[in-house]
Image (spheres, rainbow, N blue to C red):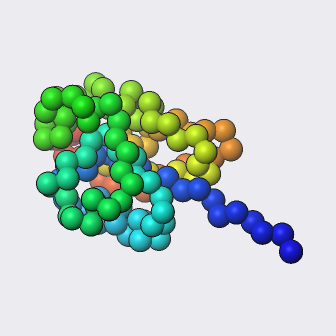
Amino acid sequence: MTTVASPRVALIASWLNQYGGAERVLEAAHAVFPDAPVFTSTYWPPAMPAAYQSWDIRVSFLDRLPLARKNQRLLLPLYPRAFESLDLRGYDILLSITSAFAHGVRVPPGARHICYCLTPARFLWG
């Protein structure tokens, strides 16, 4: 009998600095794929539910910049580069849950990218 390995899944979110609808969708995806790391631009633990602290959350270089966690609008030109810079090699399935930039990740050869596209972020069109 041949054993087939489970696909390696990565979850991708635009940012984790406020709690709303996108984060509830992310929680549902994380419940289905509890071992999947969450890749994001920035993560501010005090703004998120305590359960997130037990997740494997990996941030982009933007997380180290001043004001990135609370004032993401100031860094708009950097978001595409931040998501392109995430190292997603080794994952078979990329699931981005996004209203903004997370769908712009670079997809490794052989991987599949599924984007759960939310309503665009209001600050982008407002």
Asked if residue 100 shows in the view, the reply is no
The N terminus sits in image quarter:
bottom right
Along the horizontal axis of the image, is 9 left or right of 52?
Answer: right
Residue, x 27% and y 59% (percent of image)?
Answer: 53
> Which residue lies most toward the right here?
1
Res. 73 image quadrant: top left
Asked if residue 50 shows in the view, the reply is yes
Residue, x 34% and y 41% (percent of image)?
Answer: 59
Give above or below for 126 relative to 38.
above
Residue, x 44% and y 30% (percent of image)?
Answer: 85
Residue, x 28% and y 25% (percent of image)?
Answer: 77
Give above or below for 74 relative to 104.
above
Along the horizontal axis of the image, is 64 left or right of 55?
Answer: left
The C terminus sits in image quarter:
top left
The image position of residue 58, as x and y in percent, is 37, 45
- Towards the viewer: 30 or 80: 30
> Which residue lies most toward the front here?
54
The image position of residue 83, as x and y in percent, is 40, 35
The image position of residue 119, as x and y in percent, is 30, 53
